[in-house]
Image (spheres, helix red, strand yellow):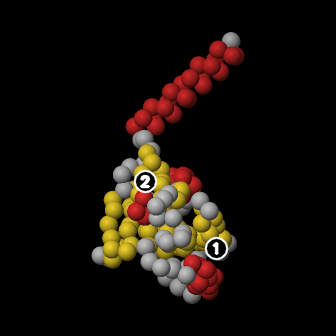
């Protein structure tokens, strides 16, 4: 009897999960000109950052209401110097309007790209700032959210992969 109950419970839970995924399908989106592939819950809007054709911004709204942005900066960049400058700025924590959350500054790696990440607070909201250096492209991940960091945000970041021909 216990085995039957467990089997029915597993079937119900699995069916519910599949139904939710069917309503909210995540799909891979590939952008070879900007050298990446990423899983997203919906088609991102794409625009040039402030009209700059060297910076493409990919934006998508998450289920939590947060907005995730990925900037692909296609300019010749000295990665080590840029990351060191960003690290020093975050570690200095001098922007009182958007202070860095203590303990959030860390070195990160993604798809073989070195980088750094930190979070800031502003008016009770949290903001993620994440930077990665590619061979020809500098990637900037950002998102604002209330409370705990949304799982969807980590799902997007962890799905990021570099693709050719940009790398």
Between residues 52 and 5, which one lies in front from this camera angle? Answer: 52
- Residue 34 screen position, x and y as percent: 43, 64
Instruction: Identify the image quadrant of residue 57.
Output: bottom left
The residue lying at 38 percent from left, 68 percent from top is 56
Q: Nearer the viewer, mark 2 or mark 1?
A: 2
- Residue 101 screen position, x and y as percent: 61, 73
Q: How many marks?
A: 2
Q: Which SS class for mark 1?
A: loop
- Residue 45 screen position, x and y as percent: 33, 59
| Residue situated furthest left in the rendering | 51
The residue lying at 48 percent from left, 59 percent from top is 164
Between residues 66 and 122, which one lies in front from this camera angle? Answer: 66
User: Can you tell which mark lies on residue 105?
Assistant: 1
Instruction: Measure how far apart labels 2 and 1 are at the Cα level.
Output: 29 Å
Quadrant containing the N terminus in the rendered view: top right
Q: Which SS class for mark 2?
A: strand
The residue lying at 46 percent from left, 64 percent from top is 166
Classed neighbour count for the residue bearing mark 1: other residues with Cα under 10 Å, few (<14), some (14–19), many (≥20): some
What residue would you read off at disc 2?
Answer: 30
User: Can you tell which mark lies on residue 115?
Assistant: none
| Residue situated furthest front in the rendering | 165
Does 54 sit above or below residue 145? Answer: below
Does 85 sit above or below residue 1? Answer: below
């Amino acid at each position: 009897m216990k085995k039957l109950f467990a089997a029915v419970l597993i079937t119900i839970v699995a069916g519910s999960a599949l139904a939710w995924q069917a309503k909210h399908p995540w799909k891979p989106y590939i952008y070879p000109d900007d050298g990446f592939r990423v899983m997203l819950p919906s088609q991102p809007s794409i625009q040039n950052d402030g009209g700059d054709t060297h910076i493409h911004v990919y934006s998508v709204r998450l289920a939590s209401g947060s907005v995730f942005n990925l900037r692909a900066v296609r300019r010749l960049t000295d990665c080590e110097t840029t990351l060191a400058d960003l690290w020093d700025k975050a570690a200095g924590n001098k922007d009182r309007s958007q202070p860095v959350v203590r303990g959030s500054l860390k070195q990160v790696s993604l798809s073989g790209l070195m980088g750094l990440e930190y979070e800031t607070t502003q008016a009770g909201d949290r903001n993620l700032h994440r930077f990665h250096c590619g061979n020809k492209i500098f990637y900037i991940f950002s998102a604002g959210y209330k409370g705990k960091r949304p799982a969807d945000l980590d799902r997007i970041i962890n799905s990021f992969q570099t693709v050719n021909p940009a790398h």
